[in-house]
Image (cartoon, rainbow, N blue to C red):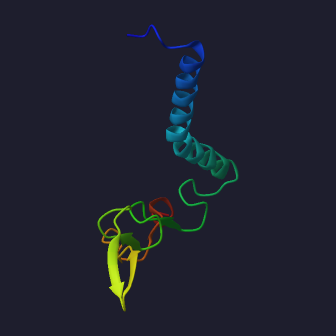
Amino acid sequence: MFEHITASEIAGYAVGALLLSATISAPKIDSLISSSQRSSLGMCKGCGDVKRIACRKCKGSGLIKEGGPFALIPIVDDNNPSFKSKSVSCNNCRGRGCFSCPQCSQL
């Protein structure tokens, strides 16, 4: 089954797997580094003394594309067809885009 695979193809698969794992783990590593920097500066670990945390569902915008991130709804207006995505208000944060920081609000 693997008789026809060359060494450069194997190396390409290995580099691809390494890049994929780095892409997946980058946000977690970034949040770990930023929280440790905030704590060393005496700031809140969660929000950095901003007192607000962005909603994870809408990523702070307050809007979510209806039907998912790749949903496009064809809209025909005066014989000018175009594709636009319809956005609805986020039901997680009620369209505000952020929450009060749970660590700061306890103080």
Q: What residue is at 42 percent from the left and 60 percent from the top?
A: 56
Q: What residue is at 48 percent from the left and 68 percent from the top?
A: 60
Q: Which quadrant holds residue 42?
A: bottom right
Residue sitting nearer the eye, 101 or 23: 23
Count of numbered circles in the view:
0
Q: Residue furthest front?
A: 79
Q: Residue furthest top?
A: 3
> x, y percentage for residue 69?
38, 62
Residue sitting nearer the eye, 68 or 11: 11
Image quadrant holding the N terminus, namely top left
Q: What residue is at 60 percent from the left and 18 percent from the top?
A: 8
Q: Residue furthest bottom?
A: 78
56 relative position to 66: left or right: right
Q: Is residue 23 above or below residue 56?
A: above
Q: Is residue 27 above or below residue 63?
A: above
Q: What residue is at 36 percent from the left and 88 percent from the top?
A: 79
Residue sitting nearer the eye, 20 or 71: 71
> x, y percentage for residue 98?
45, 70
Q: Which quadrant holds residue 96?
A: bottom left
> x, y percentage for residue 5?
49, 14
> x, y percentage for residue 90?
34, 72
Q: Is residue 14 above or below residue 33?
A: above
Residue sitting nearer the eye, 91 or 78: 78
